[in-house]
Amino acid sequence: MSRVLVEPVERDRIATAAKHLRDLLERIPASECYPGYEGFPHGWCGHASELLCTYLNDLRLSSVESFYVMGEHHTPHYQSHAWVEAGDLIIDITADQFAAELPQVWLTTDRGWHEQFDVKERWRADVIKKPDIFGWLPRLYKQMTDASAVGEEQPLV
């Protein structure tokens, strides 16, 4: 599949937004996380990627649309992972849940690490138009964007 190149200035904007979202998500106390979640980033890849995809598309930081991607593998045991793709760029804000040496905010065009997962889903996530069953993601997204708009450093939940 041919991938559109994301321009360097757009990459910088995406990186800033991804770092900002990661910072906000890290501040959510484990006790107030989605049911069954540990502290961020463990187990958060799907919801964090849905939030990031929505955020990047809403901010229109790039001429390239962002997509939620989820893959899985079964060797040596079942694992799944989700990230965001925009053109040739992979944006992953939870890869470090697998190994501490992986970046906390990873923007890369090197598909090597992510290719261990067979892609099962690829879609334009929107947590407002397609909310989760508990309605947690739209509330979190609203709090996140409200705090972003005014530059607040308050807890999100």
Image (cartoon, grey):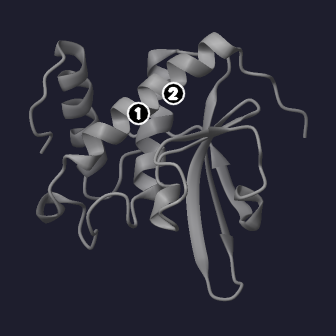
Q: 23 or 55: which is nearer to us?
A: 23
Query: At 35% from the left edge and 53% from the top edge, which residue is drawn?
Result: 132
Q: Are marks 1 and 2 in contact (CB under 8 Å)?
A: yes
* Secondary structure type for disc 2: helix
Q: Is residue 45 left or right of residue 141?
A: right
Can residue 126 be seen here? no
Q: In this view, does 34 lie to the left or right of 61?
A: left
Q: Position of residue 97 (x, y in %)?
A: 45, 64
Residue that sits furthest to the right in the current view: 1
Q: Is residue 142 left or right of residue 80?
A: left
Q: In this view, does 25 lie above or below 63?
A: below
In the picture, the quarter occupied by the C terminus is top left
Residue that carries the numbered disc 2 in the rendered image: 15
Residue that carries the numbered disc 1 in the rendered image: 19
Q: In this view, does 88 lie above or below 146?
A: below
Query: At 75% from the left edge and 38% from the top edge, which residue is drawn?
Result: 109
Q: Where is residue 52 in the image (x, y as percent from the top left)?
A: 45, 37
Query: At 36% from the left edge and 46% from the top edge, which residue is drawn?
Result: 131
Q: Position of residue 121 (x, y in %)?
A: 66, 56
Q: Residues within 10 Å of mark 1 (few under 14, many from 20)?
A: some
- Give, as a three-letter code, the residue at label 1: Lys
